[in-house]
Image (cartoon, rainbow, N blue to C red):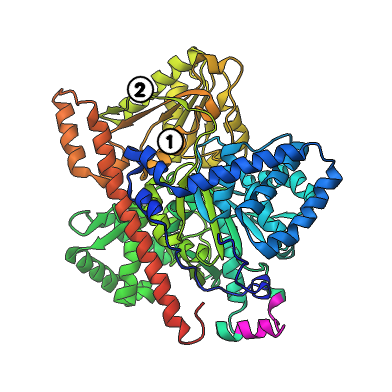
């Protein structure tokens, strides 16, 4: 973030004006060299080259020295200094000296209000966030508390701050936990969450600091964009705002996109960025059940490989000539009975492909669950339910027909946007996460954010046990159960991570069969997620959790657990990205605690059978012959599968961004673009 006075008129951002997207700042050659270095192999050299680290450390130590001098001052004097700091920050910008003064004041106030004081690595990360960087902080290093440093500094300067988290629970928890500090400094705080009424949302965004999830911010922005449609081009809107004419202001809830601090930024910027954000409205209760039933009936009669091809790697179904001929014959035979879309070759082909996708690509307890008589989508990156979301273009209704639940009305698209373009519209953007090195290039290219790795506050004591690669799912679950049983008997807590609801229930059944007491946490039991995860560090406790359930919740070790080796984490299936694997492993050995982790996987896992089917089939034949695989095989196959998958996902994100940009440019000629 530049130290200069901020360039945009406060009138424009305060009233929700749309912004041009940010351009990428130029990097110093030191930082370009650091970015080019492979993080896994040459992390020390990369960190040495990063010039940012030296500046961050200097500011942090200056703040620590200033904070010691403030300890003897009474509360009234500290509050007066916070008031005086406002005008100086607004006039001078975020210079290193002024930032150190602000951080020292915030650190001292936090010690009095919260009983917590920022340590050096958190102060370093805070400065990186204020400079518009993505700070990579290891799991358990206190990212939530660290976020108060840049959030308070920017808010004291008089600009609105959005602290963006991955779920409503964390947004509410973090805002409530940090509110005493904000109150002490004279700052207001609001929370935006799912189901909140519009007036309350507007009030929450009007506060100095607003906590919200990425999805709530995105859809509030889209709703505001729809609300100002018909108000003319961006130039006309900006001109009216400068003249004080904003007839549509009451229809808006946000007051612009100024500074965003994104927690778990890799999940938001990368994992969730593969799917465009679509705002839709019901088109009415048109009856589609008969069409969906007919399409599913025909789909069940077709033969895979002969009538259609399922490309699971790119999540697509293609009809062959044989399948097309059978569709045409089916439509001709039942045209009089069905009518409607079945008289259109293009429409009936799309409907049949949707039926095939619903059967083969969208799986129950993996991509969705059926709860309360409804099909509810499971967020693949977090394992949580998204009850207010639906698939578009009739796919959701097709899956409802497949599951024989009451269909919901189809929805019409009102607006669409990608996360890539949304976050580039913030004037200033920063983020923090435990794992970003693997995606540093894409984050730099797309969002203009340089990844800075923050040193650990305490040396890590995590022990990585050798990976185990087993031939079948059944053998894997037995091995996981045996390992969990032995560790729990020794008084160590065990956290078993799975990728899907179905997998969590499979290992739960095996544990039950062996009499192993455990807690199960997945999208069907997410109401007490934080409480279940927080207890996962007690002696002898076994916890099964989907994906990154409880992300953002500390697992504190029970009495005597550290001496026995700490929490042990078992990964039961590698994820599409090694970043998510590292997040799961990062649940153990936090803040210098003892801990260990191990991957126990099988050749029947989707990451292998979908991404690298050829090498996987070869290794399965080798194992069937009784040959023992060398230890490096699991790591090599994992690297190949994740590299293949990540390339595909990156291409998909780039395609979404290009499509969104092209659509916006084409609409700009009519005055409808933004």
Instruction: Give the side of residue 660 with respect to residue 408, left or right.
Output: left
Q: Which residue is mark 2?
A: 479
Occupied quadrant, residue 507: top left
Q: Which residue is mark 1?
A: 498
Percent of width and height locating residue 460: 47, 27
446 or 470: nearer the viewer: 446
Bin the neighbour count of mark 2 within 10 Å (Cα to Cα): few under 14, some 14-19, many 20 and up. Answer: some
In the displayed structure, 630 sits above or below 117; it is: above
462 or 376: nearer the viewer: 462
The residue segment tinted magenta is 237-249
**Outermost residue, top direction?**
490
645 or 309: nearer the viewer: 645
Percent of width and height locating residue 65: 67, 39
Percent of width and height locating residue 626: 15, 22
Residue at (56, 69) in percent of width and height: 222
In the displayed structure, 329 sits above or below 131; it is: below
Instruction: Give the side of residue 74 with respect to residue 500, left or right.
Output: right
Q: Was residue 242 drawn as part of the magenta stretch in this picture?
A: yes
**Would residue 519 be visible to someone looking at this image?**
no
């Amino acid at each position: 973030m530049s130290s200069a006075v901020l360039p945009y008129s406060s009138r424009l951002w305060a009233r929700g004006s749309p912004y041009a997207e940010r351009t990428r700042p130029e990097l110093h050659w030191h930082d370009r060299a650091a970015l080019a270095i492979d993080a896994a192999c040459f992390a020390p050299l990369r960190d040495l080259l990063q010039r940012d680290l030296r500046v961050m450390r200097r500011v942090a130590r200056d703040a620590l020295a200033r904070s010691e001098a403030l300890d003897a001052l009474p509360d009234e004097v500290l509050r007066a200094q916070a008031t005086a700091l406002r005008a100086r920050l607004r006039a001078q910008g975020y210079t290193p000296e002024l930032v150190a003064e602000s951080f020292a004041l915030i650190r001292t106030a936090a010690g009095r209000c919260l009983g917590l004081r920022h340590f050096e690595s958190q102060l370093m990360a805070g400065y990186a966030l204020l400079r518009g960087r993505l700070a990579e902080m290891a799991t358990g290093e206190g990212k939530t508390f660290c976020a108060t440093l840049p959030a308070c500094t920017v808010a004291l300067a008089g600009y609105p701050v959005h602290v963006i988290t991955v779920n409503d629970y964390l947004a509410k928890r973090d805002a409530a936990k940090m509110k005493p500090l904000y109150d002490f400094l004279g700052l207001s705080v609001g929370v935006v969450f799912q189901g909140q009424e519009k007036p309350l949302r507007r009030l929450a965004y009007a506060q100095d600091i607003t906590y919200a999830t990425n999805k709530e911010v995105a859809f509030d922005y889209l709703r505001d964009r729809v609300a100002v449609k018909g108000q003319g081009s961006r130039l006309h809107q900006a001109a009216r705002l400068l003249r004080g004419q904003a007839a549509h202001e009451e229809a808006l809830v946000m007051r612009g996109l100024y500074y965003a601090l994104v927690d778990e930024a890799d999940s938001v910027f990368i994992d969730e960025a593969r799917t465009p954000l679509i705002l839709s409205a019901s088109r009415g209760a048109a009856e589609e059940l008969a069409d969906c039933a007919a399409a599913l009936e025909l789909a069940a009669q077709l033969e895979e490989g002969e009538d259609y091809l399922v490309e699971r790697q790119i999540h697509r179904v293609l009809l062959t000539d044989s399948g097309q001929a059978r569709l045409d014959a089916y439509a001709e035979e039942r045209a009089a009975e069905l009518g409607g879309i079945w008289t259109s070759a293009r429409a009936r082909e799309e409907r049949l492909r949707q039926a095939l996708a619903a059967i083969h690509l969208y799986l129950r307890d993996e991509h969705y669950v059926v709860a309360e008589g409804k099909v509810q989508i499971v967020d693949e990156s977090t394992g949580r339910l998204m009850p207010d979301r639906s698939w578009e273009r009739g796919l959701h209704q097709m899956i409802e027909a497949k599951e024989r639940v009451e269909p919901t009305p189809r929805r019409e698209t009102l607006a669409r946007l990608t996360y890539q373009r949304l976050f580039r519209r913030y004037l200033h953007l920063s983020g923090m996460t435990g794992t970003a090195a693997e995606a540093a290039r894409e984050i730099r290219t797309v969002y203009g954010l340089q990844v800075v790795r923050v040193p650990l506050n305490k040396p890590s004591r995590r022990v990585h046990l050798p990976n185990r690669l087993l031939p079948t799912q059944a053998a894997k679950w037995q091995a996981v159960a045996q390992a969990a049983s032995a560790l729990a008997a020794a008084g160590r807590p065990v956290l078993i991570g799975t990728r899907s609801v179905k997998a969590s229930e499979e290992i739960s059944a095996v544990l039950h069969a062996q009499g192993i007491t455990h807690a199960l946490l997945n999208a069907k039991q997410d109401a007490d997620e934080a409480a279940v995860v927080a207890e996962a560090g007690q002696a002898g406790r076994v916890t099964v959790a989907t994906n990154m359930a409880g992300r953002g919740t500390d697992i504190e070790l029970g009495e005597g657990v550290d001496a026995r080796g700490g929490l042990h984490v078992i990964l039961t299936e590698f994820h599409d990205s090694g970043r998510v694997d590292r997040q799961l492993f990062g649940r153990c050995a936090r803040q210098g605690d003892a801990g260990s982790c191990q991957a126990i996987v099988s050749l029947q896992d989707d990451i292998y059978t979908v991404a690298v089917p050829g090498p996987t089939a070869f290794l399965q034949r080798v194992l069937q012959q009784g040959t023992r695989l060398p230890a490096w095989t699991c790591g090599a196959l994992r690297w190949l599968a994740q590299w293949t998958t990540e390339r595909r996902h990156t291409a998909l994100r780039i395609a979404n961004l290009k499509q969104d940009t092209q659509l916006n440019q084409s609409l700009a000629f009519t005055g409808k673009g933004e």
